[in-house]
Each structure stands twice: as C-alpha cells, then as structure tokens.
Amino acid sequence: MILHKGSLVSLVADLPLYDIVVVDVPQNVDEAGQDEIVLKVNTQRADESPTLPSLGGCSVLFDGHDDCYLYVETFDQQLPERLLGRLLTLLAGSSLVGERD
C-alpha cells in the first residue's frame, strides 16, 4: 500500500503494530522502484548490513513485529531519541496502570 505520510497516523491509530512494515519512500518512485523496495525490505535478514542505504532516497524503515519487538533504521538524527522517549513513556504508563489493577 502506498500512501501519503500525512495519512499514516489515521491509518495506524487503531491498529496493533503486529507485522507491519513502514518505509518512507521518495515521492517520485515509480512502480518498478516500489517493487524493488518491497523485495529488499521483505528479504532482509537481521544478520545482514542495514537495508536503508540500499533503498535509494528512503529515510525511515520501521518493522513492527508485535508489542514487544521492533526494528528501525533511519537517517533522521532525532528519531531514535523521540522513539526511545515514546517507548519509555508507554512502559512507565503501563506499569502505573498495572499497579491500579
């Protein structure tokens, strides 16, 4: 599925992040380029070098396996800090909710 990144939030707002892959692709990527990106992303292995540099113009690769495991590659210097902060916030919040139950 190819969609504008502005539509991404509303698409995944109520979805679990189970087996979802999101790649930020350039606006001008053609159908052959889309196929190449999908092939590279779906055949990557954890023991291989990062995939993102080979995707030509992509800046973020997110692969969410479930609520506990995710894999992220990015060229954005601020994304790791923001992502870790968000995950820690969710962890702290879930432990507070767990204490009330």
Image (cartoon, grey):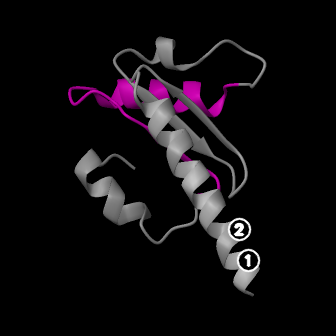
Q: Does 5 appear in magenta?
A: no
Q: Find residue 98 and name its label.
A: 1
Residue 75 or residue 30, whichever sits in front: 75
The residue lying at 41 percent from left, 21 percent from top is: 77
Q: Is residue 26 above or below residue 64?
A: above
Residue 32 point in image, percent of width and height:
37, 25
User: Magenta span covers which residues?
Assistant: 17-44
Q: Is disc 1 placed on a helix, strand or loop?
A: helix
Q: Is residue 68 above or below residue 60?
A: below
Q: Is residue 26 left or right of residue 66?
A: left
Q: Does 36 appear in magenta?
A: yes
The residue lying at 49 percent from left, 12 percent from top is: 54
For the residue marked with disc 2, what is the amino acid?
Answer: Ser
Counting labels gives: 2
The C terminus appears in which quarter of the rendering? bottom right
For the residue marked with disc 1, what is the amino acid?
Answer: Gly
Distance between mark 2 and mark 1 Cα atoms: 5 Å
Residue 16 point in image, percent of width and height:
58, 65
